[in-house]
Amino acid sequence: MPRSAPTATAPTATAPTSRARTTVASYLKVRLEQLGLDRMFGVAGNYTAPFLDTILADPHSPIAITGNPNEICAGYAADAYARFRGFGCLYTTYSVGSFTLLNTIAGSYVERVPVLLVNGAPTSKETSVEQNAALLYSHTTGYDLVDIHMFRPITAACERITNGGQAPFQIDSVLTAMLTDHRPGYLEVAEDVWRAPCIPPRRTLRSGAGQVVTAHETRDAVAATLALMAQRPKTILWAGVELQRFGLETEFLALLDAINAGREPAEQVRFVTTSMSKSVISEDHPLFDGCVTLANSEIQSLVGDDGLILGLGGWTTSKDTGNDDIRGPGTILAANGYVVIGASFYPLVDLAAYLEGLATAIAADERVRPTPLSTTRLTRFGAVTVREPAPDADLTYDAFFGALGGWVTSDDILVVDAGFPLIGAQGVHIAAKDGFVAQAAWLSIGYSVPAATGVACANPGKRTVVVVGDGAFHETCQAVSDHTAHGHNTAVFVLANGLYGIEQYLVNPNPFRNPPVAYPDPMLNSPYPYNRLPAWDFVALAQAFGALGRRVSTTADLAAVLAEIRTTPERNFVVEVCLPTEDLPHALAASVAGSVGEDEIENPSWPPVEIF
């Protein structure tokens, strides 16, 4: 994954003269090449064709144009690619294409993934005629400039390019904002402007130049951190997602080394991760102490009155903190450009400077001696020991993830979808740094299968392994054809229980209880019809997309297919994993007896005596 945001480094061959000219399409092409882009994802349309033609016309351009079955597959692929390469790029056509990408770009915005959306637009003449003569052209709604209005709230910068004179400055502005803020950018280019003349690129782009930070706030935050550590010496570190997004893994490990300098292993301070940050540091690291949910109850159990959690780059998202506001006297949270220490707030603090300042201060101050917390009560995902199933036993979530955990290696990258796959996969040991990918904050179902396209394109030396529910697979199954087309050896495991399981669990978990509560209202005793899925022949579908299709229903079946995948490195697979409808990953099964569904609370017979 990216060490830092990309910076354009390719020098200009000669200093441009006042008469030097290029085209808008060539200008954007060169800027993307300078920033290291080697692949674009999208669905072709006539409004972007001049730009794509410009790339194709240059046999020396490193940029490959990757077509996708639809825009949502392209958006997820670009997002996943950008997580490894620093930024990604999408091309689409006006409205009918770009509207589909609102979901994917919003996810990239929330999870701080720089993706450039290049949207071709009607010509300037067509726009003028539509505005003044009431003629509605194809792909237009009649609402003035609707596309750019929609993307402004979910991008770092948006520009509509309608003339060559302004184009270079607009392009540079969007690219710089995107790379500085680590969020998507949007360029809308009128079709007739692509070939318009403009000045060539000058100098190189720099991300982060002029970014406002406050040095004294950083110093004050470091000092306050040391003061709280002196009061609460028992410490555990939370390695957050920003360590990966901003390329700060090395700085985190340097801080960990400074804290533990000269200590015996048993006396060393350890660290945890959460769903958003799983594998930002290799889980083989000797001080890794588990992937957890840092809800308030967990923090209180772990920290007590004399402990401290030092969150470094961690976001307080629902999956990471169990929907709790975890700010309190025993937490320090450094992320999003600020530091919160108890009730004190330190704005405009650069995370890298804070990490480096803290490591230096701890090494120099012998009075601050953080000590490890006892983590025996830490609720780790996967901490429950699952009994080894019989070879011919029917598969369950626990049996599947238990087998997967012993099969995934450091040469694999595991991509999981939202819902039960994300929850169940947290206990799978990931040896490789950045060997786990999930959209754990936006949580759009269907992300994983097309994201695997981007992961494989960015990591050609590794195998991409996908775990997806059957409902999510219904959303974006077409991406399997991309795996085949690009020669990827991706393995997609479809966890097929015939149900939108996570939706049923949230609204009414009663069907998952063993045994279920016998409500007077029979609707509450079984899965709702609208959460049930139509039955698909996943094996036949895989073959239609050019993959090898397999179906497994027992642990012996799964073991055989896992062995086959390893001995067939040149092919991609889709494996239907048949699971009971009422089964749950153990992380949920352990709490389902006391959990409360939204519909249950509203029921007159709540609470049933069986639960309490």
Image: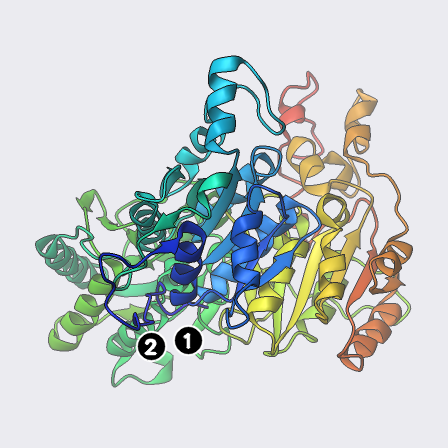
Instruction: Give the residue displayed 31% in from the left and 44% down from the top.
Output: 165
Residue 170, position in %: x, y?
32, 45
| Quadrant housing the C terminus | top right
Q: Which mark is residue 268?
A: 2
Q: Furthest-left residue in view? A: 216
Q: Residues within 10 Å of mark 1 (few under 14, many from 20)?
A: some
Residue 482, position in %: x, y?
71, 59
Where residue 547 sits, quadrant-wise, is bottom right
Q: Which mark is residue 287?
A: 1
- Of the residues tagged 2 and 1, which is closer to the observer? 1
Does label 2 or label 1 sit earlier along the sequence?
2
Q: Furthest-front residue in view? A: 19
Tell whether label 1 touches label 2 (CB within 8 Å): yes
Instruction: Give the residue displayed 47% in from the left and 64% down from the top.
Output: 37
In this view, 284 is above or below 225 = below
Instruction: Give the residue displayed 45% in from the left and 78% down from the top.
Output: 285
- 189 vs 4, left or right, is right
Q: SS for tag 2?
A: loop
In this view, 151 is above or below 345 = above
Q: Which mark is residue 406?
A: none
The three-letter code of the residue at mark 2 reads: Gln
Query: 160 or 149, which lies in front?
Result: 160
- 552 vs 176, left or right, is right
Q: SS for tag 1?
A: loop
